[in-house]
Image: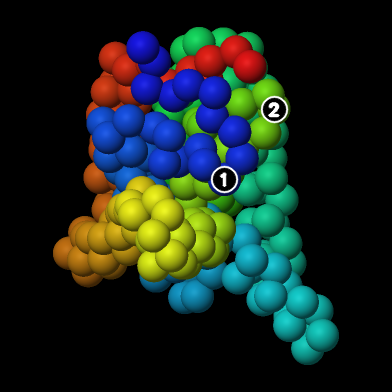
Amino acid sequence: MAPWRRVQGEGALKRLDGQVRLLASGFSAVAGFVDAVGFLITGGFFVSFMSGNSTRLAVGLTDREPYALFALGLIVAFVAGVSAGALLGRRAGPRRAPTVLTLVALCLAAAATLASLEAAPLAILALAFAMGAENTVFAQDGEVRIGLTYMTGALVKLGKGITAALLGEDRFAWAPYLLLWLGLVLGAALGALAFRYFGVGALWIGAAIMATLAAVAARLDLTPAAA
């Protein structure tokens, strides 16, 4: 049986089997890693968290600061990545996950190359594009079911799951969302550490890990079953 069967709505993550949940947390860990490196390179912008960039855009526009354009560029690049990942995923069919993850790995490698050539702004846009595409790995019927690079929704579901457990309902509904969040946080910590020692070269680590996860995903069935 495929590890993802009839996944719908906010139960998507908890209905994945344990192996695929760990893999999803690995995807989030890479997102955290990349976001931390991007944050440190730019001095306070995000390549995966567009709510933060939207706030910076609004504040920058209000204060007439030039950084508002950079924030807008990151948002546009992220949305373009989502569109590209969704299109590629639809064309790939049952090979959606490894195909999209390969795109992400290639974009991360391109970002690392651009950063090494001191083209940091282009590298950061490539990172945002990659993070947008990553969010289309778990999609069903044209809808993203599990966000991998932002945790607000996961934390909301974590809170709801804790409430359900306290009321004697599903005792462990909260666990998959905690695992996803921990993956992002751990990845971000490792990204900050890697940047301390390798600078922009840390992006090559992110690209290599994502390529490895793409190979692992190719061995698993991550395709949602027909409704």
Judge whether 19 appears above or below 202 on screen: above
* Mark 2 lies on residue: 142
Q: Nearer the viewer, mark 1 or mark 2?
A: 1
Residue drawn at 54 percent across, 69 percent down:
45
In the rendered image, residue 131, in percent from the top left (x then y), is placed at 51, 45
| Residue reaching furthest to the bottom | 63
Tell me what residue is drawn at x 28 percent, y 39 percent.
22
> Is 70 left or right of 221, judged from the image as shown?
right
| Marking on residue 109 | none
- Mark 1 → mark 2, Cα distance in angstroms: 15 Å
Which residue, given by chain and number where applicable, does mark 1 sit on?
10
Q: Amino acid at mark 2?
A: Gly
Q: Residue at x 53, y 15 (%)?
A: 225
Q: Earlier in the sequence, mark 1 or mark 2?
A: 1
Screen quadrant of the N terminus: top left
Residue 69 in which image quadrant: bottom right
Q: Amino acid at mark 1?
A: Glu
Number of numbered labels in the structure image: 2
Q: x, y (%) of residue 86?
A: 64, 28
- Residue projecting furthest to the front: 168
Residue at 26 percent across and 31 percent down: it is: 19
- Residue 170: x %, y % from top left: 40, 51
Extreme-left residue of the structure = 197
Q: Nearer the viewer, residue 163 or 76?
A: 163
Q: Is residue 95 left or right of residue 185?
A: right
Image quarter for residue 113?
Answer: top left
Which of the image's four quarters has the C terminus? top right
In this picture the colour scheme is rainbow
Q: Considering only vertical position in the picture, is 127 above or below 143?
A: below
Nearer to me, 194 or 5 = 5
